[in-house]
Amino acid sequence: GAVVSQHPSRVICKSGTSVKIECRSLDFQATTMFWYRQFPKKSLMLMATSNEGSKATYEQGVEKDKFLINHASLTLSTLTVTSAHPEDSSFYICSARDQYQAFFGQGTRLTVV
Amino acid sequence: AQSVTQLDSHVSVSEGTPVLLRCNYSSSYSPSLFWYVQHPNKGLQLLLKYTSAATLVKGINGFEAEFKKSETSFHLTKPSAHMSDAAEYFCVVTPNTGTASKLTFGTGTRLQVTL
């Protein structure tokens, strides 16, 4: 079964509201999780690296105040898209690694209307 | 530094014919290499991985890939395509240095399988 669970799989929200996406590692403890964004027919773009118990590390060009990441436990990281706008509509995917491979969540399709 | 290049953005094959998806990489470290498959609006599923053991790697669903250091390549192959193989495929490289190391994705190859 899946070892990284992401929720929700789809969300539609109104412009200006905030949306929280959860990513859980089910079978192992993940001190580090990764958040990606995928545009239509494009590859995955790393947004940030989520570190348990400390601040996330954001990639260049990613607004940390827009995309809030919290990694409060060894099995849960959350991404909150704040004051969402239509241009934030995208497919967001989380990932966590054990020593052998990376596991990916099922992804969240965010649509901001 | 590391990077990965998928040489074809789109590949179309007939069902029952061989599949070849090409990937070249560069890495400052001894890399780990992966192939992932993504079906529409889904997460990524690991097909196979190379982590400095055998250079010919067998994965799920009949896929395999060969790590060729001299050519810096990690091409994905399958002897006979099936309709269910139609999806997006990503070649991924990472330094072989632990759970916090970043993955670098190729731009993806869309595989189309026709009757």
Image: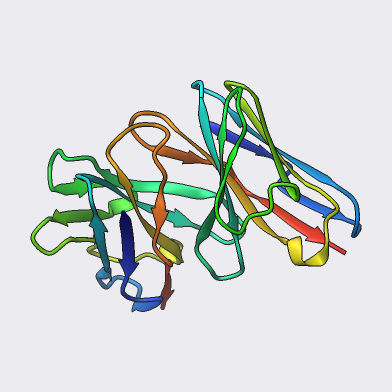
Give the vertical position of B89 relative to A18 (above or below): below
- Residue at 91% across / 56% down in the picture? A16
Q: In the image, A54: left or right of B45?
A: right
Residue B12 in the image: state x and y as whole percent: 38, 79
Q: Quadrant of residue A99?
A: top left
Residue drawn where x is 91% and y is 57% of the image: A14
* Residue A2 seen by the camera: no
Residue at 69% in and 47% down: A64
Q: Quadrant of the rendered structure where residue A73 is?
A: top right
- Residue at the extreme left of the image, as rendered: B70
Judging from the image, the colouring scheme is rainbow
Asked whether B44 or A86 is in front, the reply is: A86
Quadrant position of the N terminus of chain B in the picture = bottom left
Q: Identify the residue at image location x=40%, y=59%.
A: B90
| Image coordinates for residue A107, horizontal then vertical, percent | 62, 48
**Closer to the camera in the image, B37 or A85:** A85
Seen from the viewer's position, the closer of residues A42 and B41 is A42
Q: Is residue A32 above or below residue B79?
A: above
* Residue A40 left/right relative to B60: right
Image quadrant in which you'd find residue B106: bottom left
**Residue A40 location in percent, x, y?**
61, 69
